[in-house]
Amino acid sequence: MKDNLNYGIIGNCRSAALISKKGSLDWCCLPEFDSSSVFAKILDEKIGGHFGFIVDESYQVTQFYLNQTAILVTRFSNGLDTFEVHDFMPRHHKSNTKYQSPPEMVRYIKYISGKPTFKVDYQPKLEYAIGVTDTYVKDEFIVSLTHSEKFDTLFMYSNLDLQQIVNSEPILLTSDAFFLLGYNEKVFKPTVENMYLEHQRTKVYWLNWIDKTPKYNLYNEEILRSAVTLKLLSYDKTGAVLAAATTSLPETIGEVRNWDYRFCWIRDASMVIKVLSQLGHRSAAQRYLQFIIDLIPDKDEKLQIMYGINKEKQLTEISLDHLSGYQNSKPVRIGNAAYMQKQNDIYGILMDVINQQFEKFTVDIEKTEELWTITKGIVWVVEKHWHEPDKGIWEFRTEDRHFTFSKVLCWVAVDRAIKVAEKLDKFRKINRWKLLEAEIKNDILRQAWNDDVKAFTQSYGSKYLDASVLLMENYGFIEAKDPKYISTVLAIEKELSFDGLMYRYKNEDDFGLPSSSFTICTFWFINSLYKIGEQRKAKKMFDQLLTYSNHLGLFSEDIDFKTKRLLGNFPQAYSHLALIETAINLSEITEEERVKHTMA
């Protein structure tokens, strides 16, 4: 099997963890998504830290999600002797609107048959493994702590012998057991019964969440798994949505395109919320819009392209040089300097979500007034700055350009603002806004089209193609049947397609020529094929792309063109939101769901 990001993700909308196909916990940050890691083997095989199980060679290991949940099951069996590790982060209702989501994870060991024996390989390394982590056995728990960079602790509880665990001695399993890893010391000592109850409550939470998601005739399992993954990347406390659960997984092995994605990009998050809203998950949209409302207290304040999940505005980027990086791909970065960039497309993507909320859901008066204020502010910013160059969707770190995608999304911002104004009977500004909308559109049609290439290009005056331009149709800027759009799709296919995958672009950027496929771009292209009438070709390409996921149906940011291995941060919100959009386009809602939604 190809070397791959064969990990499952668990989480509780407060933090997340990655567990390998062999059941090793190789990435986890506590108490929150963007906290320092307590296990980081994924970023350094030797010193990163992990928590796994050692069994003899007679055991086969398989892994799957418990049906329609985010509970990950790793099954160890040699035919006679079998046990399962059920990994989850507790999440369940505390009241109608509140959830129990403690900063901890449970590894529930389910005894199945025979006399299974294993050793525990418990190697926590706190604070990104910067210094020494010492582990001690106490009366009721195992505690790991570090003083090296700053003081931090991790507590582990189990009903198994604690000394045997730390010494990695053989353990004979005769009944269910558990490991509870927590940021805080427990007030009451956990028991197997407690952990079984947490397992069942968490299971019920996910079953109920998935039950609210429409069912589709085709690709239903893929849509549900992607929806759960997007939910796992959402942060309940503030409404933020993360781009991915990891930092510094490289876009290309051995190169330096390694970034921290544990932040909320306005673009990525808005796209995620639009998809989750389409699937009927209104509360995620409400929390995210509140996140935006909280970020813009001043009417003339510009949006940053990204924020910390707790609304931090400074995301200073530093390198952790003591870590070797994923498969020796340095540097390992925390923080992200891109927060200082100017990207004009974010206003259109955000306005698209705001407009969707008014179209799809009832919005209370107070929030309506706040969103109308934001709408007016967005148009004001766009009016002042749409004609200026920026860094673009791909965050070029060198000179600014007049990127076509940014211009189109400036048009989207004004177009959606007009729609919101019409819904709210606010006609005072509409005529001026319509003039602005027409001015931006005419500018794009005149300057982004290249007659030699027969396509809308990456930026004004450029000959280079860019997959983001495919979204012109998706956002309603141009009709799918327009000859110029069809010509653009075909030109992009010829220039950027390679062996069933797509480049973002092929011109040099700050780090040279791109050498891996950006997964969302392939989904965009499949959607474009479908829209211009190439349905059979689109479905065939989509079915092939789905085979490049890992063993659990999860995608990272990138795919290697030749080997088809997953690359980049994982799991990637971009990839899964685009998978859902594409699958919905290629499928239809079931008749049962159609009736249910009609009656709702």
Image (spheres, rainbow, N blue to C red):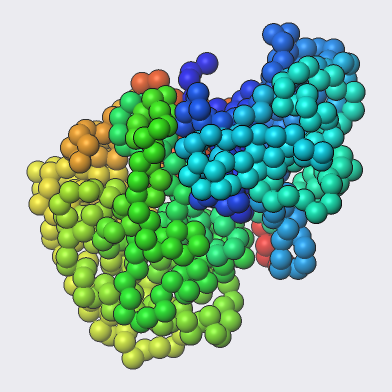
Q: Residue furthest front?
A: 147
Could you say which quadrant of the image residue 157 lies in? Answer: top right
Q: Residue at x 87, y 16 (%)?
A: 115
Is 336 on the left-hand or right-hand side of 225?
A: left
At a point 31% along the width and 52% down the height, the residue shown is 337
Vertical position of residue 328 compared to residue 71: above or below: above
Q: Is residue 461 left or right of residue 123?
A: left
Quadrant of res 300: bottom left
View extreme (top): residue: 58
Q: Name the image quarter holding the C terminus.
A: bottom right
Q: Is residue 53 above or below residue 475?
A: above
Q: Position of residue 405 (x, y in %)?
A: 27, 55
Relative to residue 122, is residue 118 depicted above or below? above
Q: Residue at x 75, y 55 (%)?
A: 92
Q: Nearer the viewer, residue 230 or 248?
A: 248
Query: Is residue 462 at all visible to an observer of this figure?
Result: yes
- Percent coordinates x, y for residue 296 in the rendering: 41, 75
In the rendered image, the vertical position of residue 361 relative to residue 249, given as above or below? below
Return the x and y of residue 83 as percentages of the image width and height.
80, 23
Quadrant location of residue 105? top right
Residue at (45, 58) in percent of width and height: 308
Most foreground residue, 206 or 444: 206
